Amino acid sequence: MARLLVDGNQPRHAGATQFQLRQWIDLAPFEDFVGLTIESAENGEARLSMPFRLCLANGGGVMHGGALVTLADTAVAMAIKSILPAGTVFATTELETRFLAPVQEGTVVALARVRGPKGRTFHGEAEVRDAAGTVVARFHSIFRIARGQGFDDPPDG
């Protein structure tokens, strides 16, 4: 979990250190705020969970799709971190989510794995399941490593 160095409701100031991660594979402030837990992250795979709390509900009373996407996206990011050197800067550049079933209670789990890197690109996928084991969402994404960190794009693009 991130350690906030200022009031968490303050605006972000570029260039200022306002929070610190305690270790490389850790939750950022937003991920901690929504209640994610990293259960495992190694060898390009990760398992994260999140309990359904009322503050994560949409107007229909089911878990908000944005919360499920946050869980899946973060699971893929942790899978990537499990194979990159600490401090490597990377980001999601594309994502697609297919919602398959509503979540009405319990804890959801995302199982993620990644392929890559090929140059600076990782392809990730995650499956999100509810407490009964039902697949509620499938997630696919592309992450890119920032330039200048020793990962080069292949000559063919």
Image (cartoon, grey):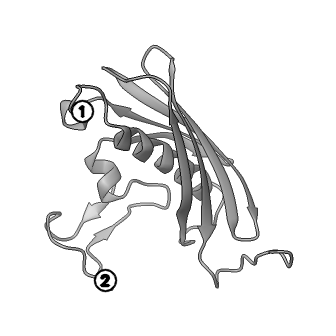
Residue 143 picture location, percent across and down: 60, 61
Return the residue nearer the eye: 27 or 135: 135
Q: Secondary structure at mark 2?
A: loop
Q: Residues within 10 Å of mark 2 (few under 14, many from 20)?
A: few
Count of numbered badges drawn on the protein: 2
Left or right: where does residue 139 sit relative to residue 63? right
Classify residue 13 as left or right of residue 20.
Answer: left
With respect to residue 153, does 46 lie above or below? above
Image location of residue 3, percent across then percent down: 28, 62
Name the kind of residue labelled 2 in the image.
Ala
> For residue 29, which quarter of the picture?
bottom left
- Tell me if mark 1 has few (under 14), some (14-19) or many (20+) residues whose alpha carbon lies within 10 angstroms of its own: some
The disc placed on residue 128 is none
Spatial CA span between label 1 and label 2? 31 Å
Report helix, strand or loop for mark 1: loop
Question: To which quarter of the image does residue 50 belong?
Answer: top left
Tell me the amino acid under the disc marked 1. Ala
Relative image position of residue 139 (x, y in whole percent): 56, 41
The residue singled out by tag 2 in the image is: 14
Q: Residue at horizontal 58%, vertical 39%?
A: 126
Residue at the (31%, 20%) spot, across then down: 104
| Residue 14, percent from left and from top | 31, 83
* CB-based contact (under 8 Å), mark 1 and mark 2: no
Which residue position holds label 1? 57
Quarter of the image with the C terminus in it: bottom right
As drawn, is 125 to the left or to the right of 151?
left
Q: Please tell me which residue is depicted at 45% across the width and 60% down the height of the picture.
A: 23
42 to the left or right of 55: right
Which one is closest to the eye, mark 1 or mark 2?
1
Farthest residue toward the top?
A: 132
Q: Earlier in the sequence, mark 1 or mark 2?
A: 2
